[in-house]
Image (cartoon, helix red, strand yellow):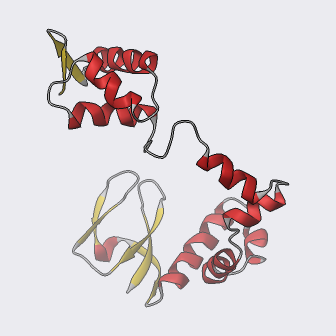
Amino acid sequence: MYAVVGCSECSNLWIIEGRSETIQCPRCGSRRAYEKRKKFVETEDASHARDVRASMLANRQGEGDAFAKLDSFDALEEAVADGVVDDEQYLEASGLDVDEVEAAGERDRRGPTRSGSKKEIVERALEDLERPTEDEVIDYAGERGVSAAYVRDALEKLVRRGEVSESRGRYRRL
């Protein structure tokens, strides 16, 4: 069972599933017994509960007429699921040649070994290597297409933020 309930403290509206002894408002945190909360609708259908809550919120904003013209959540979800554009369609619609884009990705000078952002690669080096030196982190990241200058800068920032410690030229995650 689903219910659209309201908070007497802050006027928040939300949906609850099932029934518990007390209900806490997700906005202001006030806790009330289930029986004392105002229930605007109780239904077995989650979609119906979402539609009622959305309608009430639209009416509060003075947009009830505009909301009435919209389809239900289920219909909108179905329309979105059917209308998804895949990568090839997007690239073609943008005027790009899909084969050329794929070929450019294969020619990427960083090579196929790069996985993740530059920062993630530096962080992974600190996790994978046991108390590495700066040069060891640079070698690890360099194999994955990250420049030495970026690694030095990233290590300095990580130390300043307290995420990494450096002692006698060796680094470790905290």
State whether residue 66 is above or below residue 117.
below
State whether residue 130 is above or below residue 148.
below
Tell me the quadrant of the picture where the N terminus can be found.
bottom left
What count of labels does the image hold? 0
Farthest residue, direction right: 95
Q: Position of residue 48 (x, y in %)?
A: 54, 84
Of 66 and 154, the residue lying toward us: 154
Tell me the quadrant of the picture where the C terminus can be found.
top left
State whether residue 52 is above or below residue 169.
below
Residue appearing at x 73%, y 71% in the figure: 67
Of 150 and 61, the residue lying toward us: 150
Farthest residue, direction top: 168
Of 150 and 141, the residue lying toward us: 141
Residue appearing at x 80%, y 56% in the figure: 97
Residue appearing at x 34%, y 22% in the figure: 138
Residue appearing at x 68%, y 79% in the figure: 82
State whether residue 57 is above or below residue 10.
below
Farthest residue, direction bottom: 44
Q: Position of residue 156 (x, y in %)?
A: 34, 14
Occupied quadrant, residue 71: bottom right
Occupied quadrant, residue 165: top left
In this picture, residue 27 sits left or right of residue 65? left
In this picture, residue 163 sits left or right of residue 150? left
Q: Position of residue 92 (x, y in %)?
A: 80, 61
